[in-house]
Image: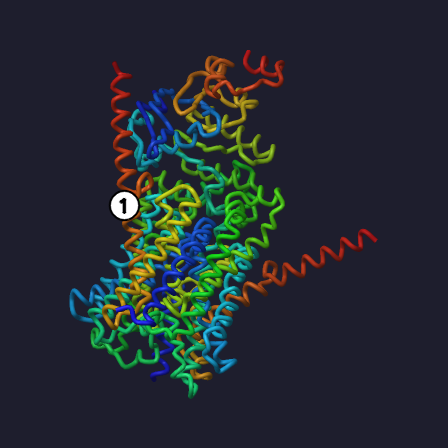
Amino acid sequence: MNEFWVLLTGSLVGITCGLTGVFLILRKTAMIADAISHTVLFGIVVAFMVTQSLSGFWMLIGAAIAGLLTTFLVQLLQSGGLQEDAAIGVVFTSLFALGVLFITLFAGNVHLDVEHVLMGEIAFVPWDSWEILGVSMPKAVWMLLIVLLFNILFLVIFYKEMKLSTFDSVFALSIGLPIVAMHYSYMTLVSLTTVAAFDSVGAVLVVAMLIGPAATAYLMSKSVVGMIVWSMAFGVMAAITGYYLAKLWNTSIAGMMAAMIGVLFMLVFLFKPHDGWTWKLFKRMKIKDTEVHVES
Amino acid sequence: MLTGNLLWVLIGAILLGIAAGLNGTFAFLQKQSLVGDAAAHAALPGIAIAYLVTQQKDLPILMLGAAITSALAVYMIQWIVGNSKLKADAAIGFVLSVFFGIGIVLLTIVNQSGTGNQSGLNDFIFGKAATMAKSDLVWLSSSALLIILMCLLFFKEWKLMIFDPVFARGVGLPVERLRVLLTALTVLTIVTGIQAVGVILMAAMLIIPAAAARFWSNHLGVILVTSAFFGALSGALGTIISSVRTGLSTGPIIVLCAASLFVISYFFAPTRGFIAKSLKKKAFKQRNVVKEAVNHE
Amino acid sequence: MDALQVTNLSVAYEEKVVLQNVNLTIPVGHLTGIIGPNGAGKSTLIKAILNQLPNKTGVVHILERPLNPKDHTVGYVPQRNAVDWDFPTNALDVVLMGRYGHIGMIKKPSAKDKQIAMECLKNVGMEAFADRSIGQLSGGQQQRVFLARALAQEAEVYFMDEPFVGVDAATERTIIAILKDLKAKGKSVFVVHHDLQTAADYFDWMILLNRTITAAGPTEQTFTEDNLQEAYGGKLFFMDQTKSNKTFN
């Protein structure tokens, strides 16, 4: 049964992050997600300092605020004349350092150690249950389901608007779409997804899960819907294979899932028919061959 | 207060700050700041592999392992961007998180092997500048000195290469080789600093002083000096502050010192700072209003 | 009725003035070229008119009313290189985006929207490419898809930013035929253009721009050597005197 919950949690992380990650790749904001995954630590610590509780609800609020703050600060520094990559780098490392400092200063004796935040502890997921509407499931599963629901709702309502503002924001603005509000709503969703996922799998796997499956799907798909389906599928595949390999080699489950995301990406990148790397290499060699033949 | 080891830590932190400040400026100008972040995260698996292979935790060996995987990560980012439709941000995020994940996997294996628990490899995640051994600090300082020297030596070439690579090639500079050298030096800077400030915050040492210095001038020479000064100052302040109160990790404090310098620069730097700009904008608007009023008459 | 009325429009970034005191009144039913040297603020003018720049001052009326996207009076073709053509979607889908303003939030495109989009693709001669990934289209084909999307907006006033840049001759002919057709139907079209050779043939109305308006009006009155010299700051040389004589009769 425990194994079931761990696998379910991992798969839910794969599905939720896979879904959210698609627009991160398409909007070229992958590194802002990386930044947010680091700064939610800051949000959670501040939420803890204010409320003195570690309840999931306050963590979600703290993370959402941290995510918005990160997005806003990056935008602010950019408008102040700093290039985007440096703006992201300055904001997230500073807030992350502040989060680490706050933990050592004010929250040293609670269950909020930094290594846990980074690597998560998915194996402990089954031991922390919530009962909602008479159903008892692990807290992580509940949180992931709720955030997944938010994600699905957002995309059901704003799918075509998100698509248009991502593809052509200038045109979207000209037909009156509120592109700034949409950007911040989406970044809030990214923050919520991050915090729901990282309690169980840690900040680093969240980044891997947000970016990796969607990046792999980007290479596979000709439509946004196709990309969403592939991305979720890759997320689940990485979660399940990662879990069993971690069990086999007795190592970090979250780390192994991230490694499997890397493996899946490389498989597609190298071997996808027609535009995989080896395929192209082969084609290039063939062209050279025919050229030689023509010359002779 | 300045006991023997603390003095060494202070020297090491200052030299590291200067090295990262100089090198970070070049990375900043190439818009490669986040590549440094990825390279820093990617050092983790290298450290674990070096330990697993040699069963030793001498700093030079671990540094070598870290350098190999860091460089591999940088190369992989370029390879992915060059050979697919994936954009740089996605490639950086992907490489960063996957390498770090693999690092965690290997680190867990190290920790579970009998001797591994005492290996202290976990310190590489957040750094432990204040408690570094003297021999390690000597390594750190000499490596930082080498980086500083190289930056001064190739200042002119890199300046031209970043500003106008086509022209640089035209005047016969080996642009590709210079680029590789710069990347190698970035990797070396990261590897030098990770034991002191940790893989996650090492990127901050490269990014923040350079970004802060950018607000003070438009001349590369001035930016480099300012960035090096900010790096040294945050290294020194961070070390001193964290030594006063026990239990504070040095890495985050150094980064927060750098961040404070950044905030000061962002607001108060003359000409490019926020306040100076706002004032100028206001004056400009007033001038325009006067002009328009004159036009209407 | 005036298609476009601009009063005292200025745009400035920090201390750099991009547009200063632009005043324009252009009646409906014209094919208007917006002409000027690089950096004259041609694209900025369109963006300012479409209310996309926060740092603009002045008043803009389209069809004698302030711009309101909900009126669906305005169609827009942004610069082709402003978007990422690796985006995973096909040609028909991009044209369908032109219907989004009409469809409204939340709702999905109807069969009728799809039919309109298909007709617009047919108009630009791209119906065979409806299912093609946009990344696989040539520059000219991409530009036609963008034009089809604007047509799908079924607007009264169209703004097009450099639609002739980087397209093949066949596409250029198709586009200009469609523009003239729009004009024949009583629509107003504004086109940012930089090729002086073709300008007089394409447009019956001109806006000569260099940071501010140097001349605006019917082509035969505005497109004169004096006005052009003023717009281009005297840097314009007419290599081929016979041709320029013909053009500037």
Q: How is the image coloured?
A: rainbow
Q: Residue at x 25, y 73 (%)?
A: B247
* Viewer-proximal residue among A56 and B102: B102
Left or right: A5 as drawn, with respect to A242: left
Q: Which residue is mark 1?
A: B267
Q: Residue at x 42, y 42 (%)?
A: B219
The image quadrant that residue A246 belongs to is bottom left
Helix, strand or loop at label 1? It is helix
Q: Position of residue C32 (x, y in %)?
A: 45, 23
Q: Residue at x 34, y 79 (%)?
A: A5
Left or right: A230 as drawn, with respect to B256: right
Q: Position of residue B166 (x, y in %)?
A: 58, 43
Above-or-below relation of B283 to A55: above
* Viewer-proximal residue among A194 and B116: B116
Residue B50 showing in the rendered view: yes
Q: Residue at x 23, y 66 (%)?
A: A102
Outermost residue on the top side: it is C249
Say which amino acid is labelled 1.
Answer: Phe
